[in-house]
Image (cartoon, helix red, strand yellow):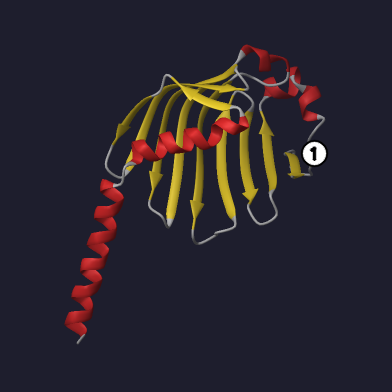
Amino acid sequence: MVKKLAIFFAYALFFIVALMYFAPKVSAFYFLEEQLKPYGVIISSEKLSDKGFSLDIEDAVISFKSIESAHLTQANITIFVLYNAIHIEGVKLSSTASSFLPLAIEKGDMVYSIADPFHVKGKVYGDFGEADLLYDISQNSVYIALKPSKLMLNKYRSTLRNFKKDENGEYIYEKTF
C-alpha cells in the first residue's frame, strides 16, 4: 500500500513539474499584456524566450497612456504556482520623471508565495536608494519602506514629503486603494 501511494505521488509530482515546464509562458505573457491594455499599460519591443521553468524578457519598452515611461533591460519571471518570482535589472525611467525621482533602477525582486497568500513582497535598488515593498491583497494597500540615497535626500526632498520618516531613518509610505 505504501509503495503504491509513493508511486502515485511520484507520478503526480512528475506531471506537475512537466506541466510547469511545458506551459505556454510566452502565450501567458501576451495574455497578460492584453489584460493590462485597459489600464493604459502597453509593453512593446520586447524579446521573449522561454527557458523551461522561467520566461526571460529583454529590451522592453513600457508605456502608460501612450507616454513612453520606462525601458526595461532584462526581466526573469518564474512561476512555480506555490512560489512565483519576478527579477528585473536595468530599468531606466522616462526623463519626464526626473523632476521627482532618480531615473535608474538597478535591480528588483518581487515574490508571491502560497506560504503568505495575502502579500506580494519586493525589494528594489536604484539611484533612489533601497526600498522594501509590500502589497496586501486582502486590504488592497501598498507599504513602502525607503532607505534613501544621498542623491534622493539632497535633490528630491519634495518627493520625500509624501513619506513619513521613522526613528530608523527610513521613509515610510502607506496607501490603501
Q: Which residue lies at the image location 68% right of the left edge and 21% below the top edge?
A: 101
Q: How many marks?
A: 1
- Where, by quadrant of the figure, is residue 99 drawn? top right
Q: Quadrant of the N terminus?
A: bottom left
Instruction: Tell me the residue that label 1 is attached to.
Output: 165
Choose between 62 and 131: the one closer to the eye. Answer: 62
Q: Is residue 33 left or right of residue 165?
A: left
Q: Is residue 148 left or right of residue 49?
A: right
Vertical placement of residue 100 versus 17, above or below: above
Q: Quadrant of the C terminus?
A: top right
For the residue marked with disc 1, what is the amino acid? Lys
- Residue 61 x %, y %: 49, 20
- Where, by quadrant of the figure, is residue 162 drawn? top right
- Residue 128 x %, y %: 64, 26
Vertical placement of residue 56 versus 158, above or below: below
Choose between 82 and 158: the one closer to the eye. Answer: 82
Q: Which residue lies at the image location 67% right of the left edge and 13% below the top edge?
A: 96
- Residue 117 x %, y %: 55, 59
Q: Which residue lies at the image location 50% right of the left edge and 47% below the top edge?
A: 111
How packed mark 1 is, by other alpha carbons closer than 10 Å (few <14, some 14-19, many 20 or more), is some
User: SS for tag 1?
Assistant: strand
Furthest residue in direction bottom, as rendered: 1
- Residue 102 x %, y %: 64, 19
Q: Which residue lies at the image location 24% right of the left edge and 54% below the top edge?
A: 18
